[in-house]
Amino acid sequence: MWILRLKPSSKHLQYLNYSTQPIHNHFMVDYLVNSVGFSKDQALSALPDLTHLKSTQNPDSVLHFLKHQCCLDNTQVRNIVSYRPKILTTSVHKTLAPKFTLLQQLGLRLPAPGLEKLVKQSNNFSSNRLGANVSFLRELLGGCDDKVSKVIQRSWWMLSSNYAHKLSSSLLVLKKNGLSDDKIQSILLKNPACLLQNPQWLEATITKVEPVLGVPPESPRFLDGLEIIISLSKSTLDMKFGIFRSFGWSDSEILTMTKALPFCLRSSEARIQLSLNFFMNELGYTPAYLATHPKLLVYSLEKRVMPRTQVLNVLRENKLLKKNFSLCSIAALSEEKFLKDFVLPYREFVPHLFEAYTKATGHQEERD
């Protein structure tokens, strides 16, 4: 009878030794649980990046730096370590501190949530690159550090790139299409990522704004229109335009609306349908009127337009209004102004008007 005996390879033995090691007993498991606030499962998940550590000396210095020099709270520190466990192996003196000392030297003061994001991405950029990017942004934004901070907070992933090289072509495209320095600054502040796209894509996008939305480059609404073109696909825009057409709107009426207020198209298809149904089928407004009063379409129906419409109807039924107010002018009022002029003066004449209105809007507090 033959017995087959296999001699395990050294590679197999290594695997066996590794697989049978009590990795769950590694000292960093307890450290992550007790010092960082991880659950046991979270600690075990992060452990593969930390098993080479022989002590808690470096993790201690990292946590101390994040909490006491960056002023991050325990939750933010836990989020950072969860996102990138290897940060506990990073040298504070050589790697972390120089980057954040640079921000302080440059006069930048990022809020804690922004600093949390910056720390998460800190392995992707060097101090030299960060300094060059900040200097470039400062020059581009007129030396305003608040604006530089806003751009950095909105574009963490860009910190490792060469701003000057990537933005130069985009800036030429913007100026070629008639955008002023102020508008270029606004684009950089609102949507810096779009300026790092292919220049050909950027130019094609800019040239769509006027034919699609009727907004020329010199219009104060051009940047709003550009944001709509960037954020919504052609199929989504076509779908939304189709809803307006289904309610009898002509293409010229749609363009009148988008030219005045491009953000009308930010509402979902369902929300657009609800708004048009309310204003046209229930209140009897025409496309021509709504196209020239587009703000009506962006106000909240449930919390603003409908409750105020009901108040006006009640006041008219009780012949308490001295003149005929338009819904457009009423909807534009602040909450405080509307209550002061159209609700509080009539509490004695119309019982429960105040209570019904504040319940409908979600403002339950009592007002004198």
Image (cartoon, helix red, strand yellow):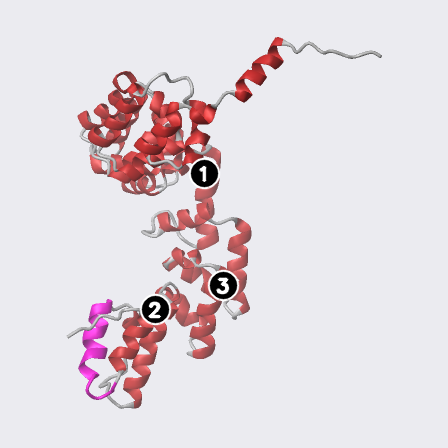
* Residue 81 placement (x, y as % from top left): 36, 31
Q: Toward the viewer: 15 or 150?
A: 15
Identified by mark 1, the residue type is Glu
Q: For mark 3, does the 10 Å Cα neighbourhood hold few (<14), some (14 to 19), or many (20 or more) residues?
A: few
- Tell which residue pokes out farthest to the front in this image: 1
The answer to if 60 sits in the magenta stretch is no
Query: What's the CA distance linking mark 3 and mark 1?
Result: 32 Å
Secondary element at image label 3: helix
Q: Toward the viewer: 341 or 137?
A: 341
* Residue 275 placement (x, y as % from top left): 44, 69
Relative to 22, does residue 361 appear above or below in the rendering?
below
| Nearer the camera: disc 2 or disc 1 | 2
Residue under numbered circle 3: 270
* Residue 124 placement (x, y as % from top left): 38, 24
Identified by mark 2, the residue type is Lys
Instruction: Give the quadrant of residue 80.
Output: top left
Mark found first going from the N terminus, 3 or 1: 1
Quadrant of the drawing holding the C terminus: bottom left
Query: What's the CA distance linking mark 2 and mark 1?
Result: 40 Å
Residue at point 24% right, 36% down? 110
Mark found first going from the N terminus, 2 or 1: 1
Q: For mark 1, does the 10 Å Cα neighbourhood hold few (<14), some (14 to 19), or many (20 or more) residues?
A: some
Residue under numbered circle 2: 303
Q: Which residues are magenta?
A: 334-351
Q: For mark 2, does the 10 Å Cα neighbourhood hold few (<14), some (14 to 19), or many (20 or more) residues?
A: some
